[in-house]
Image (cartoon, rainbow, N blue to C red):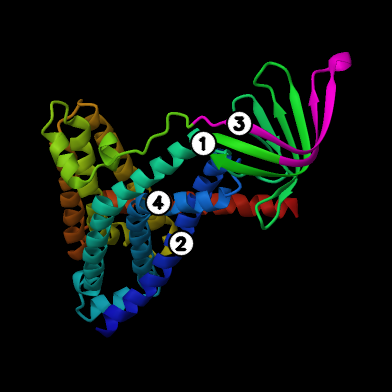
Amino acid sequence: MILDRYLLRQWLVSFVGGLVLVLSVLLLGRALKLLGTVSDSGQAWILIGELLVLTMPYFLILTVPMAFFLSMQNTIVSLQQNSEMDALRASGVSYTRMLRSFFVVVLLLWFGLSFTSMVLLPQGQLGFNNILAKVYAMKGVITFSPQRFTQGFDGVTVYVDGEDEQGVYHGVILEDHRSGISVIYTAKSARFIMGGSYLELRMDNGVRLEGAGADQRMLSFDHYQVSIPLSDGNWRERKSKDHVTMMTMGELWESIQSAKPDAATAELNRRILLPSTVLILFFFALPLSITQKRSGKAGSLISGIALLVMIYNAQLLLHRQVSQGAFPGWTMWAAQIAMLMLAMFLWRRAEADRMPRLFAVAGEWIYFVHQWIMHRLAHRWSQQR
């Protein structure tokens, strides 16, 4: 138990740190991408926050197995570099005994990821698509960002300097070009009020300019009202049955019984198989982490990243082929089982200290490449100084 707690403490620090780092990068990238979509709304950051929360299940399914695998690799390599693993092996402790606590972690993560994949993921996709569809159809029709020109209507452009706590906009400029003649309104203050399918602009203390050149007409007003018809776009509330990524597990099963089950079959298999990737990576962690001490952590880290790229690309390729009807659905299961069998085989070889020669050669090659790169960088650095 003492050994289990010691290893789990070492693993947990790198797992949490890696997971937070990767999630932060993914969420930041998604936030920047969404900012251009919702920037016309005065509630842009609230909308972005809601959308990011709804994408979390998808990101967690991808990043949790990665973080678990790389942090487990880091723990094993640290034990090896510090000769702790040699001492444990000399005292008769097997690799399986050393790392048995991680198997419990794998089962917990597998259960949690399965719930996320089967329940939270489709709910998040449905909510995300509903918000985006409404933003695309009606963005900018209720609130406006200060000091930005908002073109959320056909033929109407709105600019405001700012908004006070009562929801009154100040420094309002509106250009109405719907009739083919430019009409410009300026007002010290204004309120935007939703009225059915119209947005009413009630302006105070302003000027109305119509026409151009000698035909220009100006009208000063204390109060003026302009009605702007709102286009709902073609927005309607999305239903879970609209797309396989938003369907519940029961709806997916019903869709599989239909005449065109390919997309539903691929999605159902993906939701079941993706969480099991954490089990495959658990068995791969030991054989890919046992390297010569002089190679440090670089070799195992590079091989681990290469494995992740291959596994996720294989899963993506098979999912695409099955959804298009090119491959039968069982090929996704066959690939997952084959990877699991290979990982378990390599674990047993590592336990018996009989790893394939290829791993030793690859480790040596990575070590020499790493040393060559470091030498070149050090040489260039010394020349620049």
Q: Foreground mark, 4 or 1? A: 1
Of pointers 4 and 2, the one earlier in the residue sequence = 2
Of pointers 2 and 1, the one earlier in the residue sequence = 2
Q: Where 282 sits versus 33, above or below? A: below
Whether the magenta-drawn stretch holds residue 16 is answered as no
Q: Which residues are magenta?
A: 203-231
Which mark, by number, is residue 138? 1
* Observer able to see residue 310: yes
Circle 1: residue type: Met
Residue beneath the point at 32% across and 56% down? 65
Left or right, 250 with reference to 71 = left
Which mark, by number, is residue 20? 2
Cα distance in 3D space between marks 2 and 1: 34 Å
Q: Where 19 sits versus 175, above or below? A: below
Cα distance in 3D space between marks 1 and 3: 13 Å
Cα distance in 3D space between marks 2 and 3: 46 Å
Q: Within 10 Å of the Cα at label 4, are there few (<14), some (14-19), or many (20+) other Cα atoms? A: many
Give yes or no for contact between labels 4 and 1 (Cβ–Cβ under 8 Å). Answer: no
Residue 71's quadrant in the figure? bottom left
Q: Where 260 sits versus 76, above or below? A: above
Q: Within 10 Å of the Cα at label 1, are there few (<14), some (14-19), or many (20+) other Cα atoms? A: some
Q: Which residue is mark 4?
A: 54
Q: Residue 57 location in percent, x, y? A: 35, 53
Cα distance in 3D space between marks 4 and 1: 20 Å
Q: Which residue is mark 3?
A: 228
Cα distance in 3D space between marks 4 and 3: 33 Å
Circle 3: residue type: Ile
